[in-house]
Image (cartoon, coloured by chain):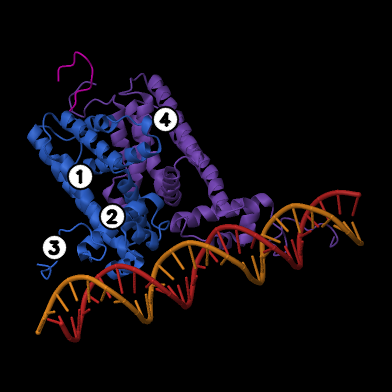
Chain colours: A purple, B blue, C red, D orange
Amino acid sequence: MSTSRPDPDRHPDRRRRPARDDVRRALLDAAARLFARQGIEGASLDDVAADAGFTKGAVYSNFGSKEGLVAALVEDRTSAYLDLGLEAVDELDGSMAVRAQVLGDRLTAASDEQRDWHLLFFELWQRAVRSDDADGAFRDRRESLRAAVAEAMEEHAARAGATLSMPATDLAIVLMALSNGLAMERMVAPEDVPEELLGKVLALVVGDTPAPRPGDAQ
Amino acid sequence: MSTSRPDPDRHPDRRRRPARDDVRRALLDAAARLFARQGIEGASLDDVAADAGFTKGAVYSNFGSKEGLVAALVEDRTSAYLDLGLEAVDELDGSMAVRAQVLGDRLTAASDEQRDWHLLFFELWQRAVRSDDADGAFRDRRESLRAAVAEAMEEHAARAGATLSMPATDLAIVLMALSNGLAMERMVAPEDVPEELLGKVLALVVGDTPAPRPGDAQ
DNA sequence: AGTATCGGATACTGTTGAGTATCGCACCCG
DNA sequence: CGGGTGCGATACTCAACAGTATCCGATACT
């Protein structure tokens, strides 16, 4: 028994080497955390590696450079973000106004919960804007998110039997812009931005709400 | 005559010492430019000073530290921004929908024109969010901008004889969020964000537009 | 004019952090 | 079980940059 292969389920053994993918994950997670909190320039590779329980060597072995780590982070986080967006848009029903309200609430909750990641997002976005054409990855991801959102909106409008107030692609952009903009405002001053605001505005914009005048027959 | 005080209106004399305020201005402008384009961490004080036609000595003499320069920049640019916002909101008339549309167009034009400054703004905003309570300056400025916008909106609604669809303070936030969010989107992909989109959405949100159904009597 | 002061230039310091060269242990193969 | 290799640790290099000490010349005061 003592000669058999050591049990991998032991408590974290100091002398056991972690699987490659675990190292990658741990590094990416630590990078997301520290980059979000201190800025990408503000966090050193030593810090990131230490936070993940490794050393800089692990970073260079896995990503080749700081830039490489950031690139991997873009891939990783943008797809997570896209998934989150698509999930929020799923399983809505009722009138368009109700759908809009619920979607708004979900998105607001999500960005409160993931404050750090959202903050990181803005920094990645800044980089994408500055690097005049490089880092197309971020742009591409944004583009597919927009397309997905537009499609989902058309589908919902059809199912709810409503007509959209403007082209779905424009609405998709408005949704993203508003959600990002309000998230920003909420980060600076949470108490100034009511939780249900995004939903309310979306309902107004999406356009099949009757003006809220009592006595008005749909 | 040759013994009289040298004429200050001569062409820029290499041996003439520039007035203190001119130095300050030149440094602030250079800082705004470079910080916007390369990020605050990404631009060195040597670069900034050189771009303004001076050396680092001038920066330390005027601002004491890099942090001091950034703080001065916050003061300078945020008040410029506020002025710009108030100007955009002035001299609007017609129905609320028309006012909203015109305001939207103006704001969109302004942020296209001042792409660099706007980019810098996002970075200052990030700093304000990260520095948990320090740098209240930025927060304060945002707060007064919001108040001013809210007040202006109420005034316009009163003058146009319209009722706002929600509290003016909420509307102010929506306006700021949307304007910032769309500006972001336009920076990544200008062709995807129609110029008149902000105006359209504002008109919808502000709320006195009849739904665009032909045959509907106001 | 003669002198003091102020403000920017110049030259230097110390530190930080990205990147690299090399090492050595743990896993895998025969 | 014994050598080879992959991967992370360790210890270094080198450059960039914030900050400082000092200097020097133009303005301001008498």
Chain designation of label 4: A
**Mark 1 vs mark 3: in front:** 3
Chain designation of label 3: B
Helix, strand or loop status at disc 3? loop
Name the residue rendered at 39%, 48% in the picture: A112
C-alpha distance separating marks 4 and 1: 37 Å
Task: Tell me, yes or no, whether the highlighted magenta stretch contains residue A148.
Answer: no
Check disc 1 and report the residue beneath it: B85
User: Is disc 1 on the same chain as disc 4?
Assistant: no
C-alpha distance separating marks 1 and 3: 40 Å
**Mark 4 vs mark 2: in front:** 2
User: Is disc 2 on the same chain as disc 4?
Assistant: no
Residue A139 seen in this snapshot:
yes
Q: What is the span of residues highlighted in magenta in the rendered image?
A: B208-218
The location of residue A24, given as percent across then percent down, is 62, 51
Residue A99 seen in this snapshot:
no
User: Is disc 3 on the same chain as disc 1?
Assistant: yes
In the displayed structure image, the side of residue A142 where residue A193 appears, left or right: left
C-alpha distance separating marks 2 and 1: 20 Å
The location of residue B1, given as percent across then percent down, is 9, 67
Helix, strand or loop status at disc 2? helix
Check disc 4 and report the residue beneath it: A92
Name the residue rendered at 38%, 22% in the picture: A157
Tell me the tag on residue B29: 2
User: In the rendered structure, are the residues bearing label 2 and label 1 in contact, judged by CB atoms less than 8 Å apart?
Assistant: no
Tell me the tag on residue B7: 3
User: Is disc 1 on the same chain as disc 2?
Assistant: yes
